Every structure is written in structure tokens, then in C-alpha cells.
Amino acid sequence: MRLPKSAIRTIEMWRLGFVATVTPGGRPSVSPKGTFIVLDDETIAFGEIRSPQTIANLTVTPELEVNFVDQFLRKGVRIRGQATFLRRGTAEFDALLPRFEELWGDLTTRINMIVRVPVDEAKPLTTPPYDDGATEEAMIAQYKKKFSEMYP
């Protein structure tokens, strides 16, 4: 499935995705990952640095969902797919690593593997004020104010 341009923009602007997996015991597990990139308009990936539980979960059940949210627009995307692992030292890993190095420099030395996710499904996320006629400009203004109060 092709990612909408708005989804690509959100991922590339924020990079932080909340990855939902299922534990081997069937319990839900959510973990933030801050190294997401868009490989192409049908595939995303993240660099695994400190994610032993996420990797353990995906090894048993490779299906995952990732949520990305623009904190000012309060819009985002929910992406589902099947994870595949590209391990350090493989040709596939080595081919993609420069894309991560451009963004994170020396942090990439700590990437153990790249988790590649072909997009099976992409659905938009929005907040209820949009149902009541809120505009993107109004949401941005509201959250700029809120963030400036939180982090003066």
C-alpha cells in the first residue's frame, strides 16, 4: 500500500513512532522508536538500538502497528505491516545504513539491526476538535501556546 504524502511528511518531520506488538503471552506492548525513516512510498524502517522486548515480540509475531502523530496539528497516521530484520553485517543492512547516518551520525554505531516494515495498511489519525470544525491553523496556534507554557 502506498503511504499518503501527509503520512510521509509526518514521519519525516517527527521520526518518533509508537510501535505496538504482541508479547509471546498475548499481551499488548507499545514502545517508542525515534529512528524511523521512509524507505519509499510503501516501506518504513527503524534502527533497533535498545529494543530487546520489541524484537522478541516481533520474532514470534512479526505483525506490528506504528502510530505517528504531529504534536501541533494533532493529526497522524496508523501503519500496519509485517516486520523483517536486516542484521548488521548483511549487504541489505550495509546498503541502508547511510540513510540513517545522514540523520543520526554517530548514533548509528549503536544500531543492532534495521527493522523494515512494508506498509499493509495506513489509516489517518485525527483529534476530535477537527470533527467540530477546528482548523489546522487553530490547532497549531493552540499547541504552540501550550508547549511554550510547558517549556518556557
Image: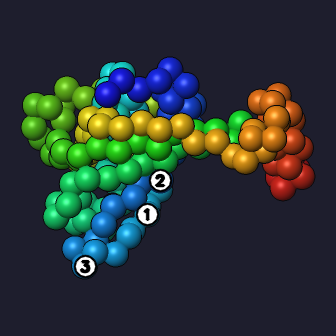
Q: Is residue 35 visible?
A: no
Q: Residue furthest bottom?
A: 25
Give the class, few, some or many, for how many residues have Cα within 10 Å of label 1's Cα (few <14, many ≥20).
some
- What residue is drawn where x is 58% and y is 42%? 125
Query: Looking at numbered disc 2 in the image, what kind of residue is underneath it?
Result: Phe
User: Residue 18 has which mark?
Assistant: 2
Q: Is residue 26 above or below residue 151?
A: below
Closer to the N terminus: mark 2 or mark 3? Answer: 2
State whether residue 34 is above or below residue 42.
Answer: below
Q: Splitting the image into 4 quarters, where does residue 31 fall?
A: bottom left
Could you tell whether 131 is left or right of 8 in the image? right
Give me the residue at 84% from left, 55% from top. Answer: 150
- Residue highlighted by disc 3: 25
Percent x, y for residue 147?
81, 48
* CA separation in Å, label 1 and label 3: 15 Å
The CA span between labels 1 and 2 is 6 Å
Residue 30 has which mark?
A: 1
Mark pair 2, 3: CA separation: 20 Å
| Farthest front residue in view | 132
Dot 1: element: strand
Give the percent coordinates (x, y) of residue 7: 50, 30
Residue 83 in view? yes
